Image: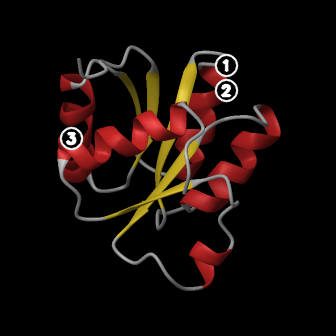
Amino acid sequence: MEHVGREVVLLADDEDAVRRLVRLALEQGGYRVVEAADGAEAVAQLEANRGRIGVALLDLSMPRLGGVEALLAMRALEPRLPAIVMSGRLEGPEIAKTPTDVLLLAKPFRPDELAERVRAALEGGPR
C-alpha cells in the first residue's frame, strides 16, 4: 500500500502557478500545506507554526531570501527540520551552499517524484 502523508509541508515558491500546482499534488498525497511566497515569508510561517512543520520544500531562487538562506534561518529555530530545495538548475554556487542533509528536486518534476522526495525527507533518506 502506498504511503499517504499526514504531515505538514511548508511550501515556499515565488511563482504562484508553481506553488498552486505543488500544493495540489501535496494535498492529493494527504499532506497539509502551509504556503509562503518567498524565503522571508517561509521563515515567518515556520515561526507561526512552530512544532507543526514536518518538512520544508523551498525554491532555490526567491526574492528577499533564497531557499538556502531561508533554510539556514529556519534551522536556527528548528535545527532538525527536514528540507528539500527545488530548482531548474541543480548546480552552481547556490546549490553548493546547500547543507548536505537537504534533498534536491529538479524542476520540472512529476507528482510521483515530488511524493518520493517528500517522503524521503521526512524519513531522513539519501540525497
The answer to whether residue 6 of the structure is visible from this angle is yes
Circle 2 sits in a helix, a strand or a loop, which is it?
helix
Secondary structure of residue under mark 1: loop
Q: Which residue type does callout 1 highlight?
A: Arg
Q: Find residue 25 and report its horizontal and vertical position in percent.
A: 20, 35
Residue where numbered disc 3 is placed = 20
**In this picture, residue 13 sits left or right of residue 77:** left
Tell me which amino acid carries mark 3: Arg
| Residue 80, horizontal then vertical, whole percent | 74, 34
Q: CA distance from mark 1 to mark 3?
A: 23 Å
Instruction: Give the vertical position of 118 relative to 47 (above or below).
Output: below
Going from the N terminus, do you reach mark 1 or mark 3 first?
3
Does 80 appear above or below 70?
above
Under circle 3, the secondary element is helix
Q: Which residue is mark 2?
A: 47
Image coordinates for residue 122, horizontal then vertical, percent? 53, 31
What's the residue at 55%, 31% (across, down)?
Answer: 123
- Which quarter of the rendered picture does the C terminus lie within? bottom right
Q: Quadrant of residue 66?
A: bottom right
* Quadrant in the rendering for residue 96: bottom right
- Per the rendering, the mark at residue 50 is 1
- Looking at the picture, tell me which residue is in the foreground, 32 or 91: 91
Q: Are marks 1 and 3 in contact (CB under 8 Å)?
A: no
> Is the C-beta separation of discs 1 and 2 under 8 Å?
yes
Residue that extends furthest to the bottom in the rendered view of this protein = 92
Kind of residue at disc 2: Glu
